[in-house]
Image: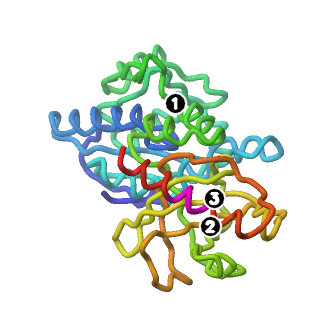
Amino acid sequence: MKVYYQLEDFKLPKKNTITTGTFDGVHIGHRTIINQLNKLAAETGTESVLFTFWPHPRKVLFPHGDPIELINTIDEKIKLLRDTGLQHLIIYPFSKEFSRLKAQDFVRNILVDKLKLKEFVIGYDHQFGRNREGNVQQLRELGSLHNFNITQINAQTLDEVNISSTKIRNAVKQGNVALANSYLNYNFQITGKVVKGKQLGRTIGFPTANLDLGLVDKILPKNGVYSCLAVVNNQKLKGMLNIGLNPTVENSSKIKIEVHLFDFNGNLYGQEIQLQVINRLRDEQKFESTDSLTLQLKKDKLLALQSFAK
């Protein structure tokens, strides 16, 4: 998959099969669209192209509103899209000026003239252009005018619930990562660099790696303890994750992300690791002593190991 950060860098001479959208989460519904995109591109001898945006439009259009918390960082999204078989990914710099572009101008000036649109694959609720004025009926009219075809994907459902990025975000915020994972069809990810903490965990037999996520608009599961897998040097290690304020030993004012890896004794400082969150084990608690905390952590480890066995 080739990645483009400027429209001018995309210079394919042939016609293309294109879809557009933010694709936050790259969930089951998104993958259905991309699968159809790739299939149609192969059938028509065109290239498959995803035109997406960064930063997220809500961050640009409503900078003083509730901050958008995303399922994926841009790097996570790129890695997930690489696994779909997509051929080209355009990450367009979203701006207020771009948001004012009329629907027909977006289609003509960008999709048709610059990206050489031949086949357009869209979701069931696709809207686009200034104030989301563009709809499927308008697209069909523009398709007749500019000689491109429309393929619309029906809403994908899981247990009779429409899958959407919003529903996945809600499940993550509620701590229901198992439900979020079923919608995503992969484990919810947290990626960060290991930094030094207070190193109190090693004194009670549960050393932890503290993760710094950097300045990202990343949604986090509700405070609590979770089973997880850590991808370290292309190896998956089992462990358990605490997200919260460390009320027993620190009572921090800032959310901390700490992972204890089972059967691991190496040094991870400075390394970037990816956590795959599997299941919620319990709420974060304040314990009367480090002894009672240690006892609970032993119970948590047993629960975590059971969640891997399911």
The amino acid type, in three-letter code, at marker 2 is Glu
Q: Is residue 158 above or below residue 89?
A: above
Q: Is any atom of residue 6 visible in this view?
A: no
Q: Secondary structure at mark 2?
A: strand
* Quarter of image, res 211: bottom right
**Considering only vertical position in the picture, is 68 above or below 191?**
above
Q: CA distance from mark 3 to mark 1?
A: 36 Å
- Secondary structure of the residue carrying tag 3 is helix
Between 147 and 32, the one lying in front of the other is 32
Pick whichever of labels 3 and 2 is earlier in the sequence.
Answer: 2
Tell whether position 35 is magenta: no
What is the magenta range?
A: 296-301
Q: Residues within 10 Å of mark 2 (few under 14, many from 20)?
A: many
Q: How many marks?
A: 3
* Principal secondary structure, stretch drawn in magenta: helix
Foreground mark, 3 or 1, reads 3
* Residue 10 picture quarter: bottom left
At x 39%, y 51%, the residue is 308
Q: Is residue 214 visible?
A: yes
Query: Where does label 2 land, which residue?
Result: 258
Closer to the chain start, of discs 3 and 1, is 1
**Dot 3: within a 10 Å radius of its alpha carbon, few (fewer than 14), some, or many (20 or more) residues?**
some
Q: Quadrant of the N terminus?
A: bottom left
Residue 298 lies within the magenta run? yes
In this figure, which residue is indicated by the disc labeled 3? 296
Q: Position of residue 297 (x, y in %)?
A: 60, 62
Residue 206 x, y percent position in the rendering: 58, 73
**Amino acid tagged 1:** Ser
Q: Which residue is mark 1?
A: 164
Q: Secondary structure at mark 1?
A: loop
N-terminal-most mark, 1 or 2: 1
